[in-house]
Image (tube, grey):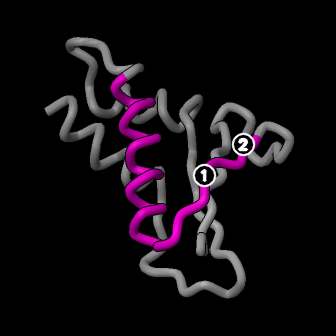
Amino acid sequence: MDRYKIVVADNFNYMDEEQQVEGRRYPTYEEAVAACRRIVDSWLDWQHEPGMTADALYDTYTAFGDDPFIIALDDAPVGERFSAWDYAKERCRAICG
């Protein structure tokens, strides 16, 4: 039984629920977090350009990137809160060196 769903917001249209897209559902919180990480990684890989700094990539992400979040269904327990922005900041440093 799926207990978590992902919703992907658009940082460019912050707080505009009409721009949010409901994603897949997952049976575990860990699987939902892994899916969110893949969404952020994919966006960062798409936007990264050679020579780009981590700050520039992160600024682009926070202005325009896909911002996935997790919703627990039917009172499912939630692990440590996933923050796409925090994860993106870590990944920008790793990608850009």
Q: Which residue is pictured at 82% across the width and 43% down the height?
A: 16
At label 2, the amino acid type is Val
Mark toward the viewer: 2 or 1: 1
Q: Is residue 26 above or below residue 53?
A: below
The main secondary structure of the magenta stretch is helix
Figure label count: 2
Q: Which residue corresponds to mark 2?
A: 21
Left or right of 49 on screen, residue 81: right
Using a 10 Å C-alpha cutoff, classify the residue at mark 1 as few (fewer than 14 neighbours), some (14 to 19) or many (20 or more): few
- Res 95 → quadrant: top left
At label 1, the amino acid type is Arg
For the N terminus, the quadrant is bottom right
Q: Which residue corresponds to mark 1?
A: 24
**Residue contact at pointers 2 and 1, CB within 8 angstroms:** no
Residue placed furthest toward the right? 18
Q: Is residue 93 above or below residue 12?
A: below
Magenta residues span 20-45
- Res 31 → quadrant: bottom left
